[in-house]
Amino acid sequence: MHDPPFYFFNFKTLNLLVSLLQFKSFMARYLVFKSKKMMVKIFSIIPENVK
């Protein structure tokens, strides 16, 4: 009976991959959010220097 452990292993790795992908997408969204805030700060600072 070699099949059950193999399937179990596959299921566990799949779960791990899914959670990793979810974490990555969360991090990506967080970074985009942070960079947007930074861009707003930069663009609000630039006009001050141009005047």
Image (cartoon, rainbow, N blue to C red):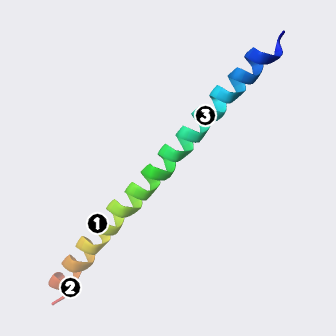
Task: List x then y, in percent, for residue 22.
Answer: 52, 46
Q: If you read the primary sequence from the N terminus, does the residue marked by circle 3 or circle 1 appear first?
A: 3
Dividing the picture into quarters, in which one does residue 29 lie?
A: bottom left
Q: Residue at x 28, y 66 (%)?
A: 38
Q: Amino acid at mark 2?
A: Pro
Dot 2 falls on a residue whose secondary structure is helix
Q: Position of residue 36 (x, y in %)?
A: 34, 68
| Disc 2 residue crowd, few under 14, some 14–19, many 20+, Cα 10 Å | few
- Estimate the spatial distance between the alpha carbons at disc 2 and disc 1, rounded to whole Å: 15 Å
**Observer-nearest of 11 and 33:** 11
Q: Does residue 27 sit above or below 39 in this rendering?
A: above
Of badges 2 and 1, the one in the foreground is 1
Quadrant of residue 4 in the image? Answer: top right
Q: Which residue shows up at 31% across the image and 71% down it?
A: 39
Graded by Cα atoms within 10 Å as few (under 14), some (14 to 19) or many (20 or more), the crowding at tag 1 reads: few
* Vertical comparison of 14 with 36: above or below: above
Circles 3, 1 touching at the beta carbon (< 8 Å): no
Q: Eyeballing the image, is 19 above or below 10?
A: below
Give the residue pinned by disc 2.
Answer: 47
Cα distance, mark 3 to mark 1? Answer: 34 Å
Of marks 3 and 2, the one in the foreground:
3
SS of the residue at dot 1? helix
Q: Secondary structure at mark 3?
A: helix
Q: Which residue is mark 1?
A: 38
Name the quadrant containing residue 51: bottom left
Q: Amino acid at mark 3?
A: Asn
Type of residue at label 1?
Met
Question: Which residue in the protein does label 3 denote?
Answer: 15
User: Of marks 2 and 1, which one's residue comes earlier in the chain?
Assistant: 1
